[in-house]
Amino acid sequence: MTYEPITEENKGDWIAWLEEHAAHLTGKKQEPITRDLLNTEEGDLGTIKDLVGNLLATLKNQPVTIF
């Protein structure tokens, strides 16, 4: 998937999405091996790819592809 930098137009959507995840993660213990931590339809790996891809694209200000 190719991720585009976060823009002013979609920034609010990203804030809402991240706030949902922050609320879900609040109070969870950090343990070396935790599965189903984010518990989304996309699963942990899909969610992590979205976080990393969009943050990296935004910081680099260019598209980033993660397979």
Image: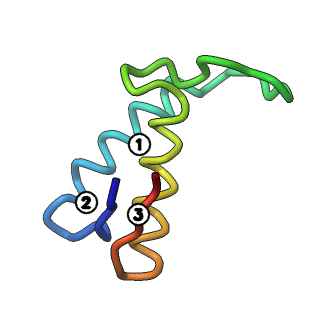
**Nearer to the camera, 4 or 8:** 4
Q: Residue furthest bottom?
A: 61
Q: Position of residue 14 (x, y in %)?
A: 30, 50
Of labels 3 and 2, the one closer to you: 3
Is tag 3's residue or tag 2's residue first in the polypeptide sequence? 2
Q: As displayed, is residue 13 above or below residue 62? A: above
Residue type marked 2: Lys
**Nearer to the camera, 16 or 51:** 51
Q: Residue furthest left?
A: 9
Q: Secondary structure at mark 3?
A: strand
Q: Position of residue 62 (x, y in %)?
A: 35, 80
Q: Is residue 6 left or right of residue 33?
A: left
Q: Secondary structure at mark 2?
A: helix
Q: As displayed, is residue 6 above or below residue 51? A: below
Is tag 1's residue or tag 2's residue first in the polypeptide sequence? 2
Q: Residues within 10 Å of mark 2 (few under 14, many from 20)?
A: few
Query: Residue at label 2?
Result: 11
Identity of the residue drawn at 86% across and 29% down: 32
Q: Is residue 33 left or right of residue 15?
A: right
Q: Residues within 10 Å of mark 1 (few under 14, many from 20)?
A: few
Residue type marked 1: Leu
Tags 3 and 2 touching, CB below 8 Å: no
Query: Residue at label 1?
Result: 18
> What's the CA distance linking mark 1 and mark 2?
11 Å
Residue type marked 3: Thr
Q: Position of residue 27 (x, y in %)?
A: 67, 22
Query: Residue at label 3?
Result: 65
Of labels 3 and 1, the one closer to you: 3
Q: Secondary structure at mark 1?
A: helix
> What's the CA distance linking mark 3 and mark 1?
21 Å
Identity of the residue drawn at 31% across and 70% down: 5
Q: Position of residue 31 (x, y in %)?
A: 84, 25
